[in-house]
Amino acid sequence: MLNITNISGIFKEMKHTTIIFIAVIIVLTVFTLVLYSGFKKEMAEKATLQSKLAEIMKERKQLSEEVEDLKVIKNDLELKAGELETQARLISENYEREKSQNDAIRAELKEKTEKYGGIESRLEAVASEKDMLQELLDAEKVKYSKLKESVDRLIEVKDVLEDKVRDIINKQGIELERIVVKAEGELEGKVLVVNREYNFIVVDMGVKDDVGLGDFLTVFRSGKYLGEAQIEKIYDTMSAATIVKENKPKAIMVDDNVIMRGN
């Protein structure tokens, strides 16, 4: 049977066990709280770390995109650098070529300048000679004017004399006709063409006959004087002469005879 002493011991033992159990519970509770606090703190830190990791990943992604953009920009810059290098090389080559051309142009300009100096001197000499010739020409013009006045007076005298002779012939009823007599050794030919529109004739005397520009031809038929012509153009076997005088209109005809008497 249980006695009081045993019961008391049991109670003491139960009390001691309870205290231990309570202490264990308290320790477990504290430990649990500590663990929970640590876990909560750890979760907060983990959340913070995850947030930072997300930001880092976001920044990394942005950095990756920026790196890719930088790679594209780098490639563009490399291409542009290559183009600029090519342009620089071309510009350098053009500069050297233009410099060489400019040197050649300068040399040519120097040569032409030296030549121009000589030409300018010659031009001054020519201008001086021109002035001298102008003075001579002016003097010749004065002489020509005086000579023309003399010729005009002679023509007037000639016309008066011809009028007087014509009057005498008309009064006496005499037909005055010039007789052409060919001198020994004079060159004789024939009229081949008569052109009334331009007032010239063509005769069968040319270079082979030693005729000269300005020579006068006397035209006649059967010894009768018809007129005169002056040679203007000479060919190998013929000559063209301007009709300067006829004893009557259209007196000269094809096959008429001509002799050359010089000018």
Image: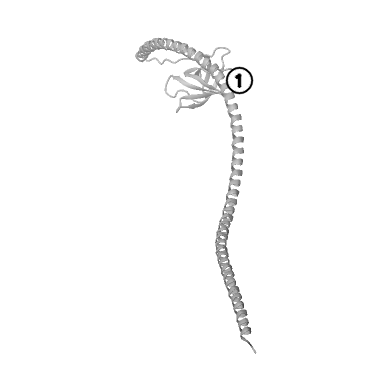
**Which element is circle 1 on?**
helix
Quarter-wise, where is residue 19 in the image? bottom right
Q: Residue 130, position in %: x, y? A: 47, 14
Please tell me whether residue 163 is drawn above or below residue 29 in the rendered image: above
- Is residue 68 visible in the rendered image? The answer is yes
Q: Residue at x 57, y 67 (%)?
A: 34
- Number of marks drawn: 1
Is 177 drawn above or below residue 58 in the view shown? above
At x 59%, y 27%, the residue is 103
**Circle 1 sits on which residue?**
208
| 45 lies left or right of 248 | right
Q: Quadrant of the N terminus?
A: bottom right
Residue type, numbered disc 1: Lys
Res 237 visible:
no
Across and down, in percent, residue 230 comes to: 49, 19
Between residue 20 and residue 147, name the one nearer to us. 20
Residue 4 locus on image (x, y percent): 61, 85
- Closer to the camera, 151 or 120? 120
Q: Residue at x 61, y 46 (%)?
A: 78
Q: Where is residue 20, by image quadrant? A: bottom right
Above or below, 244 against 85 in this view is above
What is the crowding at mark 1: few (fewer than 14 residues within 10 Å), some, or many (at least 20)?
Answer: few
